[in-house]
Amino acid sequence: MRLDKKTALVTGATSGIGEAVTSHFRREGARLLLTGRREHLDSAEPDDVYVAGDANDESFVSSLAQQAADTFGSVDVVVINHGLQRSSPLVDMAYDDARDVLHSNLLSAFLVMKHFAPLMPAAGGSIVCVGSRLGMVGKPEEVLYSAAKGGLIMLAKGAAIEWAPRNIRVNVVAPGLTTTPVIEASFQRRPDPEAYRREREAQIPLQRLATPEEVADAVLFLASPESTYITGAVLPVDGGYTAF
């Protein structure tokens, strides 16, 4: 198994892409440290360690890293999957909302990297950031989200260069629209959910949304020994959306 006895942290592990990543990693033999905002994680297995908390809070991230050190000794793989999306025309967005989007998608990733990179063993490790296609292209009413995800890409690229001497690889998976509970709920808020879904699918060359499992496949690849010469890369999993 590709991650046999490797220790992996997955943030935002409670649903959607994060839940699919944990399932893939568990299948591949990883020891899992999971975190999210929910008080309990129903999908956790007995051998998993789940810690509820807010990855935007440095004191929590620091304490999580200490718990990882005490429990596992080191961490081989870090998947930064949490984030926040708030849609609004730029001139209508409140400063507090803009700050929350930037903090949840960019600065909190910095906090996880800062506290977990030192726990990676001498042989190195892999950090995989779950970004977005909107980190590479702009979209009306998603300006701050695009800025945050674009910043995440540059954070990963800079960290990849800085930590290359330690053999810590840092890469980004950039999903397109994916059939997560959050996206499905956003469709249901539209006056005609099915018409809106068809409209969004028509904008994607492959004419459909991704599944969480397809995104998790890419995360697993970048976390695994099959990608040991890949760092500082952005892997779109967007059905061709950013190929235009």
Image (cartoon, grey):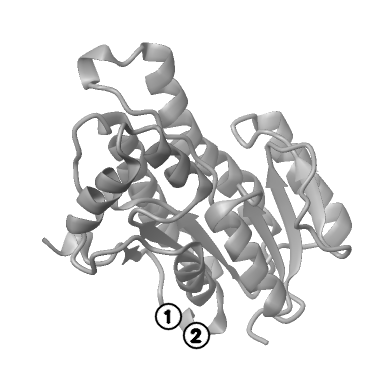
Question: In the shown orientation, is residue 155 left or right of residue 18?
Answer: left
Helix, strand or loop status at disc 2: helix
Q: Amino acid at mark 1?
A: Tyr
161 versus 40 height, above or below: below
Disc 1 target residue: 229
Q: Position of residue 45 (x, y in %)?
A: 82, 63
Q: Of 43 and 122, which appears nearest the observer?
A: 43
Give neighbour class at mark 1: few <14, some 14-19, many 20+ (Cα, 10 Å): few
Q: Is residue 80 visible?
A: no
Q: Amino acid at mark 2?
A: Glu
Q: Of 196 and 62, which appears nearest the observer?
A: 196
Q: Identify the residue at horizontal 71%, vertical 30% (top origin).
A: 59
| Labels 2, 1: front one | 2
Q: Identify the residue at horizontal 29%, vertical 53% (top origin).
A: 133
Label 2, label 1: how many angstroms apart (C-alpha)?
Answer: 8 Å
Q: Identify the residue at horizontal 41%, vertical 30% (top origin).
A: 102
Question: In the shown orientation, is residue 150 left or right of residue 16?
Answer: left
Q: Is residue 148 visible?
A: yes
Q: Position of residue 119 (x, y in %)?
A: 70, 57
Disc number at residue 6?
Answer: none
85 versus 17 height, above or below: above
Whether the residues at callouts 2 and 1 have beta carbons within 8 Å, the answer is no
Quadrant of image for the N terminus: bottom right
Disc 2 target residue: 226
Helix, strand or loop status at disc 1: loop
Q: Identify the residue at horizontal 59%, vertical 32% (top origin).
A: 56
Give neighbour class at mark 2: few <14, some 14-19, many 20+ (Cα, 10 Å): few
Q: Of 198 and 4, which appears nearest the observer?
A: 198
